[in-house]
Amino acid sequence: MTGAVKLKPAAGMVSAFTAAETHAMERALQAALEGPRGANPLVGAVVVSADGKQLVAGHHRGAGTAHAEADAIAQAAAVGLDLSGCTMVVTLEPCNHVGRTGPCTEAIIAAGITDVVYAVDDPHDPAAGGAATLRAAGVRVRSGLGADEALDLNRQWFEAVAARRPFVTLHIAQTLDARIAAEDGTSQWISSPESLADNHGIRSRIDAILVGTQTVLVDDPRLTARDGDGKPAPKQPVRAVMGLRAIPEDAAIHGDDGLAVHLPTRDPREALSMLYASGVRHVMVEGGSSILSSFLAAGLVDELIVYLAPTLLGSGTPALNGLGITSLPDAQQWEWDASDGGAVRALGRDLRLHLRPQRHVALDHPPTRTAAEPAQGGY
């Protein structure tokens, strides 16, 4: 998307928090970074005892897994900790709806936690927010602590929520000289086996994977998620092909599970709109060059993952074929992303580079939606 949502600290912010709560929020923000980006926000939670001691820290590990609050409470239960009278410090307002997991508000109340401090409001359903439910149950609730940091942590997710489009991960497997195929078109395999395994791990947790018709015609990929033995993973992404040309009837991408879809457009925004309408909340764009370039040029990439192989080709297919940039001051700027294992990791002989768009505007307030809108990703 172009532009950015302006965010501000949650309404009713209390200016004074204890030192213990402040330190707990710092730890919660750090814990949140252990999770993966995608359809759900990065969230961390820390429980603090009445005397200010940090007892447990939890974080969200992706769609369908325990939320950060529930994760922290489960950890406490596993070691027999009684959380009655404790304070929970969390980076996002506790949820109040039943998605793939139960409401965090219920878990907090059941645990006997009497105080909740959170950073920013959840934009899913402010009309029936978790804060109101907690207060109605007698829990003291305050917000605004660490708001700037929490908003920055998930700024791309907030933008995707506001635009009602899927969160977009863009994946490139390239050589040192930014080639994704040799001059004769061969590209299997530029990446190491370890990089391929990492990519299949991402495929198994996203909602959809998107390529262009040229990639289907040239490479005839399956685009399935597979485990280390090459067997199909239990969860498979929708396989989306973007472009005006029809998909050949015998293309491998069809499979036999009905998960292949054709998006008859060359407009990345229109493609995302189609996917969102079908329930997709996290899509990974894999290529080829024209598709990768179109999403980057449109400012629609929330997360960039590059597998960099120590290989030189000198010629061949470039990873990108132009972003409409003619002057250095207009260059796209990216920053290293410390979430989900770190910004730079060695995978076999490759390097895995993890980046997100550089922050370019101040964040003033989280987007909101009406109660009638569907929740993003089922967090």
Image (cartoon, rainbow, N blue to C red):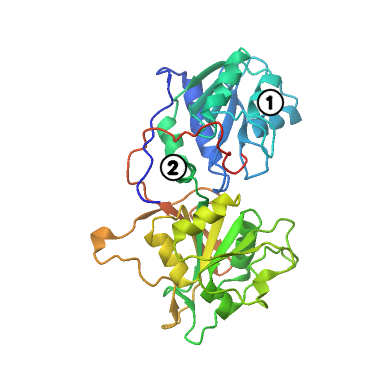
In the image, taking residue 187 as reference, residue 326 lies left or right, namely left
Q: Could you tell me residue 65's position as x and y percent?
A: 68, 42
Residue 168 position (above or below residue 349): above
Inspect the image, locate mark 2, and give the three-letter code of the amino acid beneath it: Arg
User: 137 or 172, which is in the foreground?
Assistant: 137
Residue most extreme to the top = 138
Secondary structure category for the residue under label 1: helix
Q: Earlier in the sequence, mark 2 or mark 1?
A: 1
User: 74 or 327, which is in the foreground?
Assistant: 327
Secondary structure category for the residue under label 2: helix
Q: Is residue 139 visible?
A: no
Q: Could you tell me residue 171's position as x and y percent?
A: 51, 63
The residue under the point 52% across, 22% down is 117
The residue under the point 31% across, 66% down is 324
Inspect the image, locate mark 1, and give the three-letter code of the amino acid beneath it: Ala
Identify residue for label 2.
155
Q: Could you tell me residue 240's position as x and y percent?
A: 59, 63
Residue 262 position (above or below residue 80): below
Q: Quadrant of residue 162?
A: top left
Figure quadrant of the C terminus:
top right
Q: Give the alpha-carbon distance from disc 2 to disc 1, as whole Å.
A: 27 Å
- For mark 1, does the 10 Å Cα neighbourhood hold few (<14), some (14 to 19), or many (20 or more) residues? some
Q: Could you tell me residue 148's position as x and y percent?
A: 40, 33
Residue most extreme to the bottom = 184
Identify residue for label 1.
107
Mark number displayed over residue 232: none
The residue under the point 53% across, 18% down is 141
Residue 216 position (above or below residue 39): below
